[in-house]
Image (cartoon, helix red, strand yellow):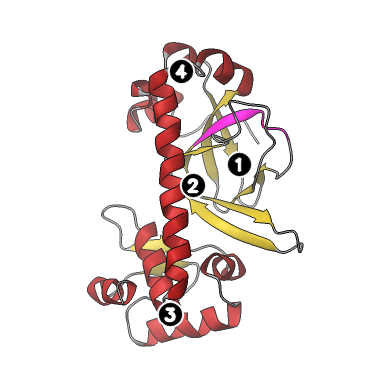
């Protein structure tokens, strides 16, 4: 984690994401701006949670280890996402590993400040509940999509990662994406090649441009 002078100030991010609507003055005053270089660790499974983070730029991968020792990617998160929201209000240890898959900027609030000034704030608690509910919905959507063929799962994932007005998406490393979609890297490569050959998406990785949005949507709904 690095503290630096960013392109945007804390106030700019607070305005961009309307955080003043959900954070009281004490929480707003405690915000710190931190950055994580690509592939750096934000949180470690089993460690103590020291900060509540708000991802405001970049992307992070959330994963955890199965009892058999295998690493399973459970989510790729984009702004605005709260990180550590499940553990921050109690003494529970972190339940997942979080790694920056792009250079990422976050707003951070120390745990003691959150517990002192946020634990009894209904607007703040409602915000954390909405964040957690959104994560459950996305997780359920991924699990339900496992019954679909891989080209449908991949199409659904790419469409879900598009930000408004953009036609391109930056995908995670292929082994991570394969884990997230419940497949092998070899099978994933075959399906990507099929979509490229059909001119549904552009060639190149990890930056992919959606060339035929309706066709990709049809696959996602198959």
Q: Distance between the residues labelled 4 and 3?
A: 45 Å
- Mark 3 or 2: in front is 3
Q: Where is residue 178 in the image (x, y as percent from the top left)?
A: 56, 71
Read off the residue under disc 4: 28
Viewer-closest of 202 and 107: 107
Could you tell me if residue 196 is visible in this image?
Answer: yes
Quadrant showing the C terminus = bottom left
Of the image marks 2 and 1, the number of the one nearer the N terminus: 1
Q: Which residue is drawn at 39% across and 28% down?
A: 126
Residue 157 part of the magenta segment: no
- Mark 1 lies on a secondary structure that is strand
Q: Residue at x 40, y 20 (%)?
A: 122
Read off the residue under disc 1: 36
Q: How far apart are marks 4 and 1 (CA)?
A: 21 Å
Of the image marks 4 and 1, the number of the one nearer the N terminus: 4
Viewer-closest of 92 and 25: 92
- Mark 2 lies on a secondary structure that is loop
Read off the residue under disc 2: 58
Viewer-closest of 76 and 123: 123
Of the image marks 4 and 3, the number of the one nearer the N terminus: 4
Read off the residue under disc 3: 149
- Mark 4 or 1: in front is 4
Of the image marks 4 and 2, the number of the one nearer the N terminus: 4
Q: Decide: few, some or many residues near mark 2? Use Cα within 10 Å; few <14, some 14-19, many ≥20.
A: many
User: Is residue 83 left or right of 197 when viewed as pictured?
Assistant: right
């Amino acid at each position: 984690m690095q503290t630096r002078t960013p392109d945007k100030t804390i106030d700019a991010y607070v305005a961009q994401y309307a955080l003043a609507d959900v954070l009281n003055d004490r929480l707003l005053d405690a915000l710190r701006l931190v950055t994580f270089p690509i592939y750096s660790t934000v949180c470690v499974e089993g460690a103590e949670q020291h900060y509540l983070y708000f991802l405001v730029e970049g992307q992070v991968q959330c994963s955890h280890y199965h009892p058999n020792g295998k690493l399973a990617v459970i989510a790729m998160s984009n702004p605005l996402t709260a990180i550590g929201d499940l553990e921050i209000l109690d003494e529970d240890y972190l339940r997942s590993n979080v790694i920056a898959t792009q250079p990422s900027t976050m707003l951070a609030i120390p745990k003691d400040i959150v517990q002192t000034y946020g634990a009894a704030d209904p607007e703040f608690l409602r915000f954390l509940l909405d964040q957690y509910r959104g994560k459950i919905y996305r997780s359920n959507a991924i699990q339900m999509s496992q019954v679909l063929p891989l080209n449908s799962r991949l199409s659904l994932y790419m469409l879900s990662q598009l930000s408004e007005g953009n036609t391109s998406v930056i995908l995670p490393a292929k082994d991570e994406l394969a884990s997230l979609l419940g497949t092998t890297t070899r099978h994933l490569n075959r399906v990507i090649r099929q979509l490229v050959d059909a001119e549904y998406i552009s060639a190149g990785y990890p930056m992919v441009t959606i060339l035929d949005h309706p066709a990709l949507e049809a696959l996602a709904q198959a």
